[in-house]
Amino acid sequence: MMNDIGTGELLFNKKKQSIVLTLIVIFLLLAVLVFFYFFSFIPIEGESMENTIHDKQYCLVQRKCNTICRGDIVIVDVADENSKSSHDIVKRVIGLSGDKLIFMLSSDGRYVEIYICKKGENSFKRVNEPYIKEPMKSTANYNQVEVMQYDSKLTTYNLDTLDPETYNTVIKNTFIIPNGNVFFLGDNRNVSRDSRYYGTRPLTKVKYKVLSIIY
């Protein structure tokens, strides 16, 4: 009788362990599925995001990124609407829907600096960009934006009180980001094809947000 009880307990314990192991495996599989539903690892190609991200590095990215902020690094599809395949590039978000951007020559005319009037504000401020590899040269590609001549008074202008002539000059050189769109640039500005070339893209074309660089 005791042997029967011992054997029964042993079988019960083995069955219990088997159930626990099965539950652990199921939990791990679900965790992996959930992780890769929301996140992924993406290899980066090219030099346009140096020195932040280098060629052949991998990044941990977030899928279904509904919230995008200025300064976020994203992977965006810039393929034409009629294209059957995507063309994904990694860039940094500079401006959001309703923001106004001005690309203005530096005082010596060699470089271009970016000024932003954020949505809801009425004056321009220079964008602080410690992440760029080198200053943006005036000879870079600016197909989609105007480059304004140097104006030392730009940051003191109040758009609500400008005289009509000055207002027209500022607006003529202003890039206004359309509703629901983002404006993006590479950190290695002088070799990057970005919104200066492609224009803006809707948030629906932003496929991933970079969370960290793995290696």
Image (tube, rainbow, N blue to C red):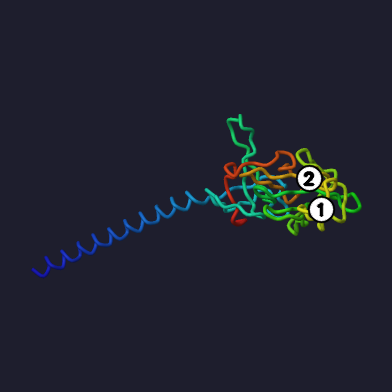
The crowding category of the residue bearing disc 1, from other C-alpha atoms within 10 Å (few below 14, some 14 to 19, many at least 20), is some
Q: Secondary structure at mark 1?
A: loop
Q: Residue furthest left?
A: 1
Identified by mark 1, the residue type is: Pro
Kindly identify the residue that appears in the image at 40 percent across and 56 percent down. 28
Give whichever of 86, 64 is nearer the camera. 64
Q: If you read the primary sequence from the N terminus, does the residue marked by circle 1 or circle 2 appear first?
A: 1
Q: Residue 85's x, y, as percent?
A: 59, 33
Assign the N terminus to one quadrant of the image.
bottom left
Residue nearest the observer in this picture, 110 or 122 = 122
Marks 1,2: beta carbons within 8 A = no
Query: Looking at this view, is 100 or 6 the one in front?
Result: 100
Q: Residue at x 87, y 52 (%)?
A: 151
Q: Which residue is mark 1?
A: 135
**x and y percent of residue 211 in the render?**
59, 56
Residue 111 location in percent, x, y? 85, 50
Q: Which mark is residue 171?
A: 2
Q: State the image coordinates of residue 89 (x, y, percent, origin top left).
A: 65, 43
From mark 1 to mark 2, how far is it between C-alphas?
24 Å
| 37 left or right, relative to 82 | left
Q: Is residue 211 above or below residue 86?
A: below
**Kind of residue sitting beneath label 2:** Ile
Q: SS at mark 2?
A: helix
Q: Nearer the viewer, mark 1 or mark 2?
A: 2
